[in-house]
Image: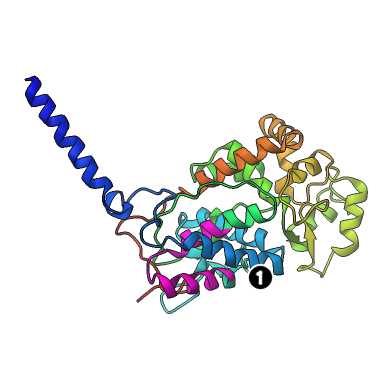
Amino acid sequence: MAHFINNAILVVLLALSLLLSFPPTTIAANVLYPQFYDFSCPQVNDIVKSIVSKAVAKEPRMAASLLRLHFHDCFVKGCDGSILLDSSGTITSEKRSVPNRNSARGFEVIDEIKSAVEKIYPQTVSCVDILALAVRDSTVLTGGPSWDVPLGRRDSLGASLSGSNQNIPAPNNTFQTILTKFKLKGLDIVDFVTLSGSHTIGNARCTSFRQRLYNNTGNGQPDFKLERSYAAQLRANCPRTGGDQNLFPLDPGSPTKFDNGYYKNLLALKGLLSSDEILYTQNQETYDLVKLYAKNEDEFFKQFAKSMIKMGYITPLTGNHGEIRKICRRVNN
């Protein structure tokens, strides 16, 4: 009996050693892990970092745009690069949705990275994985945390305009509506507060928060939850009518630096969007997290990295599902 058990153990160990001798893609096609391209495209990290570095140096706002692109992608059909697709005969692009129209940007950066990768390793790295890596690098470039990006996703064969309109949290959604949208994607209340911290960089359009400046009280006065002098500054360039596309920093203190200033602003009643403000007015748990992150940037950074990794696992396409697009804006056939 002992001899049989020992032989069985030897067989298992031999099988494991054989598996480990093959490239990762042949071992676990349905598992995401940071080393996925170590054999098939070892230069991908360097290529992504180089192009993202140039893009962010040229336009610091690009870091926030890439982050938002990844977020809007994952919340629709999962992290599958569907947001990158242009409209075609069979596809209606998610770029046309209310959350993305006239505001989603960064597509050219992803195109440039994809083109550079394709020249060396054709049809090897997915567009969605390129986006995930670009987001990590742009976060680091602006002073934020780093994390090992799980890789191995494949690109979708279609888009969902209705999903984009319905599933992405909106600036004027209620607390419960936004939390529900997070939970439907497997994210919890901690992820909600933490990922909202991405608003420490980037801008918002006047049309995204105008209702806070003029309509909430019913008498044309600013939202009482918005600090008065800050509200007055906003009203100066966000009029009651017109100026819809005027841009305002989400974190006026350090709009291009990834830090915990966003949470400090919330406590000072200077959260720009209604979806920001509700974090410190609607729920005790979120309020406590806002206070923690405002006080301790390291805690925010650590959890942000964890929540970004968690978001990256929202229903990815792996194995034989989807495809590796040659061009991110269209499917291969």
Look at the picture and state if 102 lies above or below 77: below
Q: Is residue 158 visible?
A: yes
Q: Is residue 174 above or below residue 26?
A: above
Region in magenta: 109-134
Colour pattern of the rendering:
rainbow
Residue found at x 45% / y 48%: 313
In this rendered view, identify the residue nearer to me: 234 or 249.
249
- Residue 6 is drawn in which quadrant? top left
Residue 27 in picture, x, y percent from top left:
28, 49
Q: Is residue 150 located in the magenta-colored stretch of the structure?
A: no
Quarter the N terminus occupies: top left
Left or right: where 23 falls relative to 151: left
Circle 1 residue: 102
Categorize mark 1 by other alpha carbons within 10 Å: few (<14), some (14-19), many (20+).
few
Quarter of the figure that contains the C terminus: bottom left
**Residue 96 location, x and y as percent?**
57, 70
Identity, as a three-letter code, of the amino acid under mark 1: Asn
Give the x, y percent position of residue 321.
Answer: 32, 59
Going by the image, does 265 lie left or right of 282?
right
Residue sitting nearer the eye, 48 or 158: 48
Q: Nearer the viewer, residue 257 or 89?
A: 257
Residue 281 visible: no
The part of the image, by quadrant, that contains residue 250 is: bottom right
Give the side of residue 276 with respect to residue 176, left or right.
right
- Residue at the (41%, 48%) spot, across then down: 33
In the rendered view, tell whether residue 315 sits above or below residue 269. below
